[in-house]
Structures are given as structure tokens and as C-alpha cells.
Amino acid sequence: MRKFMTKALATVALLAMTAGAQAKETVVWWDFLSGGDGVRMKSLIDEFNKTNPDIEIQATTLEWGIPFYTKVQTSAAVGEGPDVMTYHLSRLPLGVDSGVLREITADELKAAGIEGANYAPANWKAAQVDGKQYAVPFDIHSIVLFYNKDALKKADLLGEDGKPKGFDGIENFDAALKKLKDAGSDYGMSFQTAGDGGVWRIFYSLFNQQGGDFYKDGKFLDGDNVDKAAKAAGAMAKWVSDGVVPKQTDYNPSIALFTSGKAPLLMNGVWEVPTMADLSKQGKLGFEWGAVQIPTLFDKPATWADSHAFAIPDRKGKEISPEKLKAVLTAIKWMNEHSISWANAGHIPAYIPVTETEAFKTMEPNATYSSLAATAVFDPTSKLAGVASPVYEASANNITTTVNGDMDPQAGAEGLRDELQALQE
């Protein structure tokens, strides 16, 4: 009898262990994060897996840009792919239009404890299409103004607080760029004047600083918006024609001009903060640096922004189960609650409670430029917009050409409008 009981208890224990093993939910995760972002995300995933024994994230990193989004679309169409993925909010309208993304309902968000009130309003809204939620933001990444404190001080353009002074207003900013060049620099400022992304982000910021409406009711740059676009492009073109910004400069050389001290200002993304921090730590920068929200050159503050977010693919014929959905939303919530380490990559956490912590408030320069979250402007809500989209290509064809002096600003703005409108129709 004793042997029988011992055997029975052992069987029960084995069954319990098996049931426990089966209860562990596996979450298949795809992202496009490489470099420093990739290292930080891997660390977060490892920590999640250690502290959440009921869930295991199995992550795969794919190639950034069009290859990633193409693979997501083709896999979802045949019922394959991940349970959750990173996604640029700027690509959301196209993802919804092509049937790639699954809506996350208000009840599902509530059950997971994910509340829109905990996110910056513009960021949360950018995660919606036609009022429906398709993603949960993870950060805000934007362009900022990097500056060489030593060069600004020499030109009497550095305030007592260690930040640039006299930069607001297009005339003041133009004068400051000239002053910096006259003080001995090769240029006043650098940015990527060749290609699409660097030009689009600055152009879109200056356009929105005029209160422009890039896309509305199926029309691009309708009415006087085309004139606002011309004004924004014209301001950028003047920097190049005045010789205070380099012509036809690719991404990496534009950064090198700043890090070498040849251009005391750089307009680029927050994702370059780790570059500056690492060079400074290694003693390779040669000057004190900082980063602030880009100046208000026209009527109101506005800065282009995008967001890494988490989305769920709409897998045809193999929809996510309630148990898997619960695990996915648990992971998303955890990631946002622990996003302070993600901020080390220069990003602004989308989750407001993290930005209110002492750890973030003392994280520089992030804390200084985090004010841009309140006036961030996301790409137009259109299936033609977003990362690696027709809007970027049309911008390269028309606005980049204008900035480099090969097209009149009005013609460039009208060309941008016409090219996008033709694709729309």
C-alpha cells in the first residue's frame, strides 16, 4: 500500500510539473532593432524572461525598413508571423490599410491595465487609425539640436544656463548661423542635406511651426499649405546658399562635421545621443556638448516625431488566442514600465510615469529636450506616409532638390504636392 501511495504521489507531482510547464506561455517577438537599440532591447527581454516565469519571449531581429514591413505583411497574409512586433507609428495607416494589424480594443487594454492617460496625447493618438487602437507607444524619438558649448560660448551664443540663446525666430537663427561661421567654424550647422530622412524631418517641423496641415480630406498641401511648404523649404535652402550649412552631405559626413568641431550645430535624431556620449567618454569629442529641442523659427513650437511601438499582426486564419493576447499585453505593459533603460538610447519614454521619475529627470540631455513631447508632430495619417514611404521619396525628389539649390522653393512645394496627390488618386 505504501509503495502504491508513493507511486501515486510521484505521478501526481509529475503531472503537476508537466501542467506547470505547459502553462508557460511563449510569445514570438519580431523587431527591427540593431546597434545600441538592439542591445538595450535584448537586455529588456532577458530581464522580462527572468522576472516573468509564466511567459517566455522568443525574439528575432529582422532587417530595418521596407524588408521588415514586407515580411510582416506577407507572413500575416498566410497566418504566420509573430505574436507581437515593434512597429513605427508613422507606418500604422499603411499597416491598417493593408490589413496587417489587429485592433487592440478598449476592453483588452483595460484588462491589461494599459491606460491612454499614461501616454503623451500626441503619441497615443498616433497609435490610432480612425479612432481605433492598433498599437501601444514605447517611446518618442525626434530630431533635436546638438550644440558645441565651446563654440557657442566663443560666439556669445551660450546662455548662463549652458544652453543656446538668441535662436528663436528665423531671422535670429540665420544671424546666429552666420555668427558661428564668422567666429571660425567651417559651417554654422550641419544636417543630412542629401537623401530623404534628414531633410524631411526638418522640413516637416518647420512646416508645422507655421500651423500647416500636410494632409487633410484626401488632399496633400491643399490651399495655402503649399505656400507654407515653400516657406519651410526656402528657409532651409537659404542656409545652404548662404554657405552656413553644407550642400549635398550624406548622413555620416553630416555627423562628422559636428563631432570634428567644423560645424558647431547639428540637427539630427535623438538616436545619436549615445554617439555623442560615447565619444565624449572616450575623450574623442574635444568639446562640451548638449542637445535641446529645435528652436521655434516660425509661429509656434513643433518638432517632427515618430515612435517605436508594439503592435499585433492580424494573422489570417491563425488569430491570436485570448491566453496569448494576455501574455502579449503583459509584456507590452512591463516594457513600458521599465523603459528607463531604453531612454539611455536618447529616446523619450512614451510612458509618462517613467518620465516623472528622478532617474529620468536627471538624465541629460534627455530631460532637457523632453519638452518636445508636448508639441511633437507625427507624420501625416496617410497610407503614403511613414518610414521608407512615398512621402519620403517625394520629399527627396522635391524638397531635397530645393534645399540644394536645384529647384525653386515654390516649385519644390508644388512638385511635392502633385507627386503625392497623383499617388493618392
Image: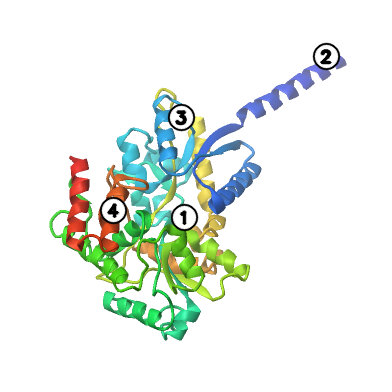
* Disc 2: CA contacts within 10 A as few (<14), some (14-19) or many (>=20): few
Alpha carbons under labels 2 and 4: distance apart: 78 Å
Q: Secondary structure at mark 3?
A: loop
Q: Which mark is residue 395?
A: 4
Does 227 appear above or below 48?
Answer: below
Give the mark nearer the N terminus: 4 vs 1.
Answer: 1
Secondary structure at numbered mark 2 = helix
The kind of residue tagged 4 is Ser
Where does label 3 land, which residue? 320
The residue closer to the viewer here, 181 or 61, is 181
* Residue kind at label 1, given as amino acid type: Tyr
Pick whichever of labels 3 and 4 is earlier in the sequence. Answer: 3
- Callout 3–callout 4 Cβ contact below 8 Å: no
Image marks 4 and 1: residues in contact by CB distance under 8 Å? no
* Distance CA(mark 4)–CA(mark 1): 31 Å
Q: Looking at the image, which is closer to me, 21 or 371? A: 371
**C-alpha separation, residue under disc 1 versus residue under disc 3:** 25 Å
The amino acid type found where label 3 is placed reads: Ile
First of labels 2, 4 by sequence position: 2
Image coords of residue 327 (percent x, y): 53, 37
Task: List the single residue furthest toward the right.
Answer: 2
Is residue 310 among the parts visible in the rendering? yes
* Disc ID at residue 4: 2
Q: What residue does disc 1 label?
A: 351
